[in-house]
Amino acid sequence: MELYELTLQQLIKELESKRTNAQAIMTAVMGRINEVDGKVQAFLTLNQTAAMEKAAEFDRQPWPGVIAGIPFAVKDNYCTRGVKTTCASKMLEDFIPPYDAAVVEKLHGAGGILAGKLNMDEFAMGCSTETSAFFPSHNPWDLERVPGGSSGGAAAAVAADEIPLALVSDTGGSARQPASYCGVVGLKPTYGRVSRRGIVAYASSLDQAGIISKDVADAALVLGIIAGHDPRDSTSEKKEVPDYSTVLTTDIKGLKIGYPREYFQQAEGNVGTAVKKALLEFEKMGAIVEEVSLPHSEYALPAYYIIGPAEASSNMGRFDGIRYGQRDNSAENVAELISGSRQRGFGPEVKRRIILGTYVLSSGKYEKYYLQALKVRRLIRDDFTGVFNDYDVIIAPTTPNTAFKIGENASDLITSYRSDIFTVPVNMAGLPAISVPCGLVGGLPVGMQIIAKPFAETTLLNTAYAFEQATDHHQLKPDLGVR
Amino acid sequence: MMMDVKEIEHLAILARIALSPEDKTELNQQMNKLLTYIEKLKELNTAAIEPLYHILPLHNVFREDLAIESPPREELLFNAPQCEDGFYKVPRIL
């Protein structure tokens, strides 16, 4: 095995046993990126010089920490002090934040080394990375296909062994959907579990930090590092953070699993079959598996396309061409300066969502659209609460399909949006969920989504871990034609 | 309910985004598709349902009123496309 192929846990062991050092790991990772990123196009910025220096420093005088000396990368909507943070937008093409996001601070605190910034849909608005203002990323399993989105660069980079760990955001499925398309693990914790400070906001009542990793044990390890209250994010909860990593167990005997009828009805046949096969695996391990109903599922996506854009139209107001970002220097007054800067800075999908959000919040439309969507949000949350009275976890496909071709949905917005139909309801209800690989269909990965009660990440991770230990889907790797 | 280009122009002013004539036509078509899609929510009778504004039962989150150090001004002005004498610069207002 090459160093770049190893999981975090394996890298930690290699470093502890002194079989390797931080420079060798960073060199292997940078070498792999140079070798394959021309094809995958996962990275927007490489932090190569600083990262190599930091690794050398570590080898001279190691510092403590759970992931000390190990490279990680973050989605380009995480603020990184001194390192360009573009949100894959022309608006922030040259933006260099004066501070680190809380999650980045915590990863630095645990000794990790920032290797680079990952491509995404512009301001996290999209399902494929095709809305990136710079270039689309490619799915390592089939370079003609999308890696999903909005964290497509992150999932593609982990799947292509370019980086062992990527931190992302998840507003409607942006960690889980690309993880599913790329055959890696994608975790979205409970809303409020992790600080959002320094993650450029899209829809604040839905946004949450996420983790993309090679396996469940790594996701558990990293959640333990990043979870917890942060006074700078008033929605982060003061609940105690369990040691997710050490309580991992494969004993799920008696676990009650519900699989929602509505999700399987909407999934493509082969995808549904792959997840049904995974459910048999859980029965073998002694779990109780039963069909359940989440009757308002079909309303989640239209409600999301009201609430998400409404919140986005407000959050995007900060981009005025004055304090940071693209500026229209030809403007003769302040109004022209702002609207001209926004015309130049924002791409089509961002403009669409701002205009839609402005519409649903405008006088006379507010009750009809926005308020109605918030009522539907309660119905969706209550559907989940009802099932969780009787079940520990819900299992469904992460996406209704496998990765689609780049450009395939260019002319049809709604079809593209539909790849998030199974992930969006989870954000509406603020629940924790994880996508784990459960096989291939036509040579492309299928993801199984596990959903748990609020703050029940331990149950969530154990369920995923038990499956992973019983199967070898997570060990399958794409062939990029280089070795 | 369908939107027309005039409505797009009004929304663009509210949202402070300048749009080219082509942008307006395209956005108009796309908005109408999206509106048709989100109209689906009308199927549900929600008369007795309270809106769920936020998933957490938070209202105001207070903290002690303590002075903390702010980042240096140069650091915050670093990303401004134009500034002068420690201030952001904008076109003449009056």
Image (tube, coloured by chain):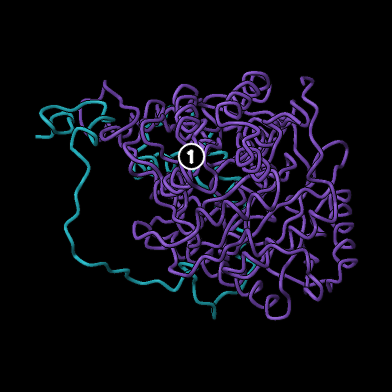
The answer to whether residue A307 is visible is no
Describe residue A443's horizontal placement relative to residue A364 as left or right: right
In percent of width and height, residue A163 lies at 62, 34
Describe residue A275's horizontal placement relative to residue A43 as left or right: right
Q: Write down the quadrant of residue A223 in the picture.
A: bottom right
The hue in which chain B appears in the rendered picture of the protein: cyan
Identify which residue, A130 or A67, lies in the foreground: A67
Q: Amino acid at mark 1?
A: Phe
In percent of width and height, residue A409 lies at 69, 35
Residue at (50%, 31%) from the top-left corner? A59
Residue at (78%, 32%) from the top-left corner? A141
In percent of width and height, residue A70 lies at 56, 37
**Dot 1 corresponds to which residue?**
A123
Q: Count neighbours of disc 1 (C-alpha within 10 A) and say few if under 14, some if 14 to 19, many if 20 or more.
A: many
Q: Where's the N terminus of chain A, which quadrant?
A: top right
The hue in which chain A appears in the rendered picture of the protein: purple
Residue at (26%, 33%) from the top-left corner? A322
User: Chain ID for label 1?
Assistant: A
Q: Where's the C terminus of chain A, which quadrant?
A: top right
Identify which residue, A418 or A75, lies in the foreground: A75
In percent of width and height, residue A180 lies at 72, 45
Q: Write down the quadrant of residue A264 in the picture.
A: bottom right
